[in-house]
C-alpha cells in the first residue's frame, strides 16, 4: 500500500516553447525529422507526433515558413499540410546524422528528477496487506514479517537460499503492494542536447485513468517492475547509444525508477557481483546515481527504486562481509515445513483440479523427501502436477493422482 498520493505530481501542458524547457533548435530538429520521414504532414499530425501543444506547433510552422524550410502543400479542412523545402531537407539530413530519434518531444532533466523524487515509493504496510499481496503463495509467517520489515526499512533486499523455494515468485509479486498506484513517466528526457528514451512499453504498463491538461510528453503508468537475469551486462547500467540510429536509451535502473528492479540469479550475470555492488554502493546509500553520455559528460538522477536480488549461491561466494553489510535486508527462503508443504500441495491440486487424498499427500511428501536432501522445496507440487497432466495428455486420458501417475512423475522429475 502506498502512503503518498500520486496527485502530488501532475505535469501541466506547456503552451509556449519556453515553458517546455527545450531549445528552439532541438524542437526544430524533431519537426524536420518527422516531416522528412513522412514526406508530408499536417500540423495536427505534428501535434500528435511531438506531444507538443497546438500553439507551439503553429509557432514552429511560422518559423519554418520564415526560414523557408517548408512548403505548404494543401489545406486539409482547417489544417495545413506541409512538406520540406530543399533547404529543409538539407537541415533534416544534418539532424539525422546527430540522431534518428523522432519520437515525442523530451522533457528536461530537471523536470524528470523532480518527478522521480516526488513520486518516490513511500509504503504504509501491515502484515495483512503484505499477506494479501502474497495470497497465492504459501509462506511461513517469519518470511512475511522479515519482508515487511525490509520494505519499511528501505534499501536493497536480498533473497537467498537453495533453488526452487520461491525467491523469484515472492519478488515477482512485490508490485502488488503498490495496488493501483500510478506515476508519470516521460517518453524521453533531454540532457546536454541529447535525447534519452525512458518510457518502454514492454516495462511500463499504462493506467486507465485519463487526466485533463496534463503534458502529453508524460505517460501515466503503473509503478514499473524490471526483471533481469543472467543476461545482465555492465553496459546495461549506463545510457546506451545505438551506433546505427544514434538513439540513446535509459539504463535498467532508470526505467525501474519509482518501482522495483529484480536482479534474478544474482552471481550468474555477465557482470561480476563485485562490479555490480561497487557500481551501486553509493546509489543504494545516497539514492542518487551518476550516468554518462557517449560524449563523456555526466549527469545525476534520483535512484528511487526497490532493488531486489535473488540468488541460490552462498553469500560468501558473492562478496566479502563488508559488501554484504551494505545490503541490510537479507532474507533466507528455506524449504517448507511438512505442514506448509501439505497446504501448498492441496492448493496446487485444487488449481489443477486433481483430487488428492491425505494418504496421497503423505506419499508425495515422503517420496519428495527421499529424493531431495535439501528438504521440501516449494516448486515440487506445481512441477509434479504439470508432469502428471503432461503424461495423461500424451496417453489421451484424464489425469489422476494415483500412485502409478505419481511414481511416473517422480521418475522423470528427480535425478537418480
Image (spheres, grey):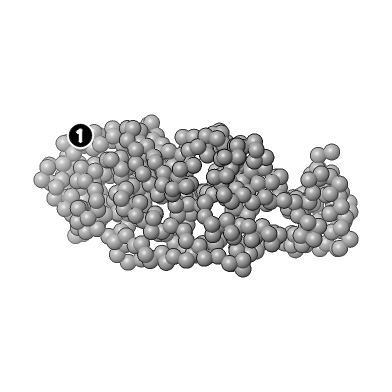
- How would you rate the neighbour count of disc 1 (Cα within 10 Å): few for under 14, some for 14-19, many for 20 or more? some
In the rendered image, residue 216, in percent from the top left (x then y), is placed at 32, 57
Residue at 61% x, 66% y: name it.
Answer: 127
Q: Judge left or right: residue 269 versus residue 109.
A: right
Q: Judge left or right: residue 185 versus residue 271.
A: left
Tell me which corner region of the image, top left, top right, bottom left or bottom right, holds residue 162: top right
Q: Judge left or right: residue 45 versus residue 356.
A: left
In terms of depth relative to the viewer, which is nearer, 391 or 117? 117
Position of the C terminus by quadrant: top right
In the rendered image, residue 249, in percent from the top left (x then y), is placed at 40, 41
Q: Secondary structure at mark 1?
A: helix
Q: Judge left or right: residue 159 versus residue 416.
A: left
Q: How many marks?
A: 1
In terms of depth relative to the viewer, which is nearer, 357 or 353? 357
Residue at 32% x, 32% y: name it.
Answer: 295
In the rendered image, residue 401, in percent from the top left (x then y), is placed at 84, 57
Tell me which corner region of the image, top left, top right, bottom left or bottom right, holds residue 403: bottom right
Please identify the residue farthest to the top as the structure is shown. Answer: 243
Please identify the residue farthest to the bottom as the structure is shown. Answer: 128
In terms of depth relative to the viewer, which is nearer, 15 or 102? 15
Q: Does the rendering let one see residue 196?
A: yes
In the rendered image, residue 321, in percent from the top left (x then y), is placed at 60, 40
Residue at 48% x, 54% y: name it.
Answer: 259
Q: Does the rendering let one see residue 308?
A: no
342 vs 278: above or below: below
Tell me which corner region of the image, top left, top right, bottom left or bottom right, holds residue 52: bottom left
| Residue, disc 1 | 90
Residue at 64% x, 41% y: name it.
Answer: 315
Amino acid at each position: 500500500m502506498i502512503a503518498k498520493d500520486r496527485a502530488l505530481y501532475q505535469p501541466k501542458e506547456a503552451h509556449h516553447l519556453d515553458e517546455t524547457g527545450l531549445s528552439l533548435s532541438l524542437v526544430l530538429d524533431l519537426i524536420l525529422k518527422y516531416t522528412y520521414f513522412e514526406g508530408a504532414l499536417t500540423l495536427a499530425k505534428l501535434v500528435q507526433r511531438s506531444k507538443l501543444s497546438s500553439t507551439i506547433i503553429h509557432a514552429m510552422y511560422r518559423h519554418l515558413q520564415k526560414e523557408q524550410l517548408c512548403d505548404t502543400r494543401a489545406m486539409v479542412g482547417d489544417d495545413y499540410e506541409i512538406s520540406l523545402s530543399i533547404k529543409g531537407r538539407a537541415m533534416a539530413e544534418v539532424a539525422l546524422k546527430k540522431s534518428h530519434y523522432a519520437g515525442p518531444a523530451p522533457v528536461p532533466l530537471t523536470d524528470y528528477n523532480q518527478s522521480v523524487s516526488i513520486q518516490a515509493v513511500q509504503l504504509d504496510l501491515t502484515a495483512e496487506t503484505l499477506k494479501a499481496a502474497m495470497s497465492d503463495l504459501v509462506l511461513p509467517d517469519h518470511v512475511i514479517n522479515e519482508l515487511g520489515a525490509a520494505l519499511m526499512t528501505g534499501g536493497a533486499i536480498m533473497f537467498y537460499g537453495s533453488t526452487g523455494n520461491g525467491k523469484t515468485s515472492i519478488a515477482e509479486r512485490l508490485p502488488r503492494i503498490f495496488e493501483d498506484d500510478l506515476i508519470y513517466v516521460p517518453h524521453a528526457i533531454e540532457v546536454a542536447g541529447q535525447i534519452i528514451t525512458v518510457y518502454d512499453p514492454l516495462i511500463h504498463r499504462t493506467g486507465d485513468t485519463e487526466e485533463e491538461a496534463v503534458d502529453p510528453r508524460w505517460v501515466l503508468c503503473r509503478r514499473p517492475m524490471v526483471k533481469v537475469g543472467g543476461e545482465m551486462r555492465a553496459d546495461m547500467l549506463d545510457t546506451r547509444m545505438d551506433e546505427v540510429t544514434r538513439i540513446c536509451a535509459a539504463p535498467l535502473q532508470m526505467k525501474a525508477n519509482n518501482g522495483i528492479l529484480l536482479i534474478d540469479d544474482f552471481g550468474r550475470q555477465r557482470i561480476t557481483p563485485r562490479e555490480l555492488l561497487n557500481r551501486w554502493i553509493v546509489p543504494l546509500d545516497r539514492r542518487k546515481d551518476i550516468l554518462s553520455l557517449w560524449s563523456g559528460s555526466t549527469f545525476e538522477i534520483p535512484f528511487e527504486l526497490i532493488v531486489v536480488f535473488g540468488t541460490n549461491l552462498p553469500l560468501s561466494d558473492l562478496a566479502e562481509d563488508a559488501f554484504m553489510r551494505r545490503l541490510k535486508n537479507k532474507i533466507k527462503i528455506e524449504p517448507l515445513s511438512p505442514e506448509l508443504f501439505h497446504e501448498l500441495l492441496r492448493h496446487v491440486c485444487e488449481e489443477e483440479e486433481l483430487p488428492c487424498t491425505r494418504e496421497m499427500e503423505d506419499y508425495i511428501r515422503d517420496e519428495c523427501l527421499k529424493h531431495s536432501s535439501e528438504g521440501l522445496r516449494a516448486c515440487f507440487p506445481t512441477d509434479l502436477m504439470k508432469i502428471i497432466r503432461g503424461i495423461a495428455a500424451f496417453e489421451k486420458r484424464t489425469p489422476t493422482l494415483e500412485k502409478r501417475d505419481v511414481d511416473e512423475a517422480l521418475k522423470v522429475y528427480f535425478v537418480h
